[in-house]
Amino acid sequence: MKKRILYVEDDNTLAFLTADNLEQYYEVVHFTNGKDAFDAFKKEDYDLCILDVMLPQMDGFELAAAIRAINIEVPIIFLSAKTLKEDRIKGLKLGADDYLVKPYSIEELILKIEVFLQRSQKQPTIKNNTCTVGSFTFDPDNYVVIKNGESTQLTERESALLKLFIDNKNTILKREKILTELWGTDDYFMGRSMDVFISRLRKIFREDESIRIENIPRIGFKLIAP
């Protein structure tokens, strides 16, 4: 059965060309505004979302935030003509998995779709994988960290990044290793995405002084934790 993609783009010509290519591999449900797309998302299941940023009625950033409020797992890819670094960072902070700038290649888009779909298809293990990080408990299967009974929900990408750090605790992780393992590629813009997620993890753990994610200049990062 084909995977189902929610595609939101108000440029009908671009939407036709993109959907026409994607429909060779996926079931594509296209909407021209954010409000109709969100109404559909609440009623039906989708395996991945592709969102333009500049949309009528509800823009892509608002739509992504609304989707994340009810589903933290579905992969979200932004396709946008907005090239400012601040726009990319805003999209990633909202929980998007990637941000491609128009014009983009269909080949690159399909490659990214496949990477995210394969990750989201991984079957959870039956055993309890929770572990402790300082005064926090981390549950990678449910994308959550807990301290004193209070839970902080992570995105799938944040959870995968934290799991990689914990598996290599007190050891330097090279930037290229992190990028290749979690993003499938080592390039500048994926590096910027990684920096956003690391900043978010630092904020979560700042209440515990025994936990630090150190920046190792020109090499990578190291999780310092008991």
Image: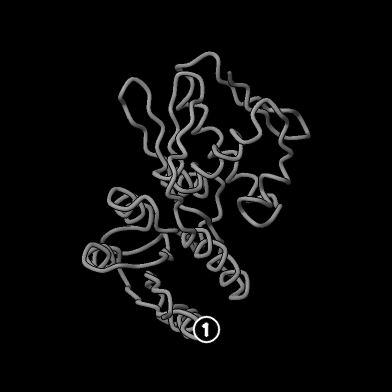
To which quarter of the image does residue 215 belong?
top right
Task: Please name the colour scheme applied to the rendered image.
Answer: one colour
* Above-or-below relation of 133 to 92: above
To which quarter of the image does residue 137 belong?
top left
Residue that sits furthest to the front in the current view = 127
At 36% from the left and 54% from the top, the residue drawn is 64
* Residue placed most toward the observer, 128 or 149: 128
Residue beneath disc 1: 21
The quadrant of the image that shows the N terminus is: bottom left
At 53% from the left and 64% from the top, the residue drawn is 118
Mark 1 lies on a secondary structure that is helix
At 38% from the left and 28% from the top, the residue drawn is 146
Image coordinates for residue 181, horizontal then vertical, percent? 65, 51
Image coordinates for residue 169, horizontal then vertical, percent? 64, 29
93 vs 101, left or right, is: left
* Above-or-below relation of 131 to 23: above
Residue that sits furthest to the top in the current view = 209
Image coordinates for residue 72, horizontal then vertical, percent? 36, 50
* Above-or-below relation of 152 to 73: above
At 37% from the left and 23% from the top, the residue drawn is 147
* Residue placed most toward the observer, 214 or 108: 214
To which quarter of the image does residue 8 belong?
bottom left
* Above-or-below relation of 124 to 22: above
Crowding at dot 1, Cα within 10 Å, few <14 / some 14-19 / many 20+, comes out as: some
* Residue placed most toward the observer, 24 or 93: 24
